[in-house]
Image (cartoon, rainbow, N blue to C red):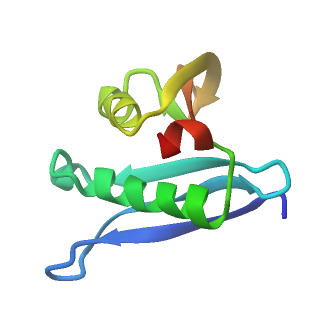
Amino acid sequence: KKGLYGDWAIELKSNHKMIGTIGYAALDTVEKRCEIGYVLSPYYRNDGYMTEALSAILDLTFRRIEIKTAVLRIIKENQRSVNLAEKMGFSYDYSINMDIKGHDREVTHYILTLEQYIK
């Protein structure tokens, strides 16, 4: 159904500590499109956790739910997320300015299609 979304906890396997979340900010199974959102504690960055989590949700997205296009919206200054998006095969689509918590921010949209994912 249009508008379904959900988040999963990202936890350390060693001690089951929650270190972030990942999920669908939007999921449209009719149009076969989704937006993925994620947050990771700064203490656990650069250790591959988000790469592992994003890989898992992309597998679910494209292979099980059969979505055709996944979107990430990234604040332009968030170079770590830009790097992750590009590493995972996403490509830049466009940018827009948005009011985020009272600040005008440039938000970049990255997309990954099913065709790009299965290459």
The outermost residue toward the front is: 119
Image side of residue 93 versus residue 79, left or right: right
**The N terminus - image quarter:** bottom right
**Residue at 64%, 18% in the rendered image:** 96
The image shows residue 19 at horizontal and vertical percentages of 28, 65
Asked if residue 89 is positioned above or below residue 3 in the image, the reply reads above
Image side of residue 103 versus residue 96, left or right: left
**Residue at 38%, 39% in the rendered image:** 88
The image shows residue 38 at horizontal and vertical percentages of 45, 52
| Residue 31 seen in the figure | yes
The image shows residue 67 at horizontal and vertical percentages of 68, 53
Determine which quarter of the picture holds residue 5.
bottom right
32 and 84: which is toward the camera: 32
**Residue at 19%, 55% in the rendered image:** 44
Asked if residue 111 is positioned above or below residue 50 in the image, the reply reads above
37 and 29: which is toward the camera: 29
| Residue 22 seen in the figure | no
- Number of marks present in the image shown: 0
The outermost residue toward the bottom is: 15
88 and 100: which is toward the camera: 88
Image side of residue 117 versus residue 44, left or right: right
The image shows residue 20 at horizontal and vertical percentages of 35, 62
Asked if residue 78 is positioned above or below residue 71 in the image, the reply reads above
Image side of residue 14 versus residue 94, left or right: left
